Image (cartoon, rainbow, N blue to C red):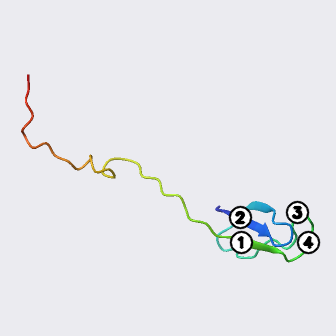
Amino acid sequence: MPIYEYECEMCHSHIELHQNVMEHEAPVVCPSCNCEHTMKRIYSASPVIFRGAGYYCTDSQKSNGNTKKE
């Protein structure tokens, strides 16, 4: 399940919740200040992780045959 971040509009505290992708409702009560209907979802960019060969400019370079062997 993905983790969603919410912020209270009254006290500006942040919480993270594990929610199902189909759940789109924000929590009703802030756990810090107990205010009702003040939580809003914070949207942020997802991290991108490059693993394996082929992502760097040096991975696709081929030798040109001009190297000298001693």
Task: Confirm or deny contact between disc 1 and disc 2 (CB under 8 A).
Answer: yes
In the picture, measured across the screen, residue 51 lies left or right of residue 26, that is: left
Precedes in sequence: disc 1 or disc 2: 2
Nearer to me, 48 or 22 = 48
Q: Secondary structure at mark 1?
A: strand
Instruction: Find the distance from the CA under tag 1 to the CA under tag 4.
Output: 16 Å
Q: Measured from the top left, where is residue 67 in percent x and y?
A: 9, 34
Residue 35 is marked as 4
In the displayed structure, 5 sits above or below 38; it is above
Precedes in sequence: disc 1 or disc 4: 4
* Residue with the mark numbered 1: 41
Residue 5 is marked as 2
Q: Residue furthest top?
A: 70
Q: Amino acid at mark 1?
A: Arg
Which quarter of the rendering shows the N terminus?
A: bottom right
Q: Secondary structure at mark 2?
A: strand
Instruction: Find the distance from the CA under tag 1 to the CA under tag 2.
Output: 6 Å
Precedes in sequence: disc 4 or disc 2: 2
In the displayed structure, 59 sits above or below 19; it is above
Q: Amino acid at mark 2?
A: Glu
Q: Measured from the top left, where is residue 70 in percent x and y?
A: 8, 22
Q: Secondary structure at mark 4?
A: loop
Instruction: Find the distance from the CA under tag 3 to the CA under tag 4.
Output: 8 Å
Residue at (64, 62) in percent of width and height: 2
Instruction: Find the distance from the CA under tag 4 to the CA under tag 2.
Output: 17 Å
In the picture, measured across the screen, residue 64 lies left or right of residue 50, that is: left
* Residue with the mark numbered 3: 31
Residue at (84, 75) in percent of width and height: 38
Instruction: Using a 10 Å C-alpha cutoff, classify the residue at mark 3 as few (fewer than 14 neighbours), some (14 to 19) or many (20 or more).
Output: some
Instruction: Find the distance from the CA under tag 3 to the CA under tag 2.
Output: 13 Å
Instruction: Using a 10 Å C-alpha cutoff, classify the residue at mark 1 as few (fewer than 14 neighbours), some (14 to 19) or many (20 or more).
Output: some
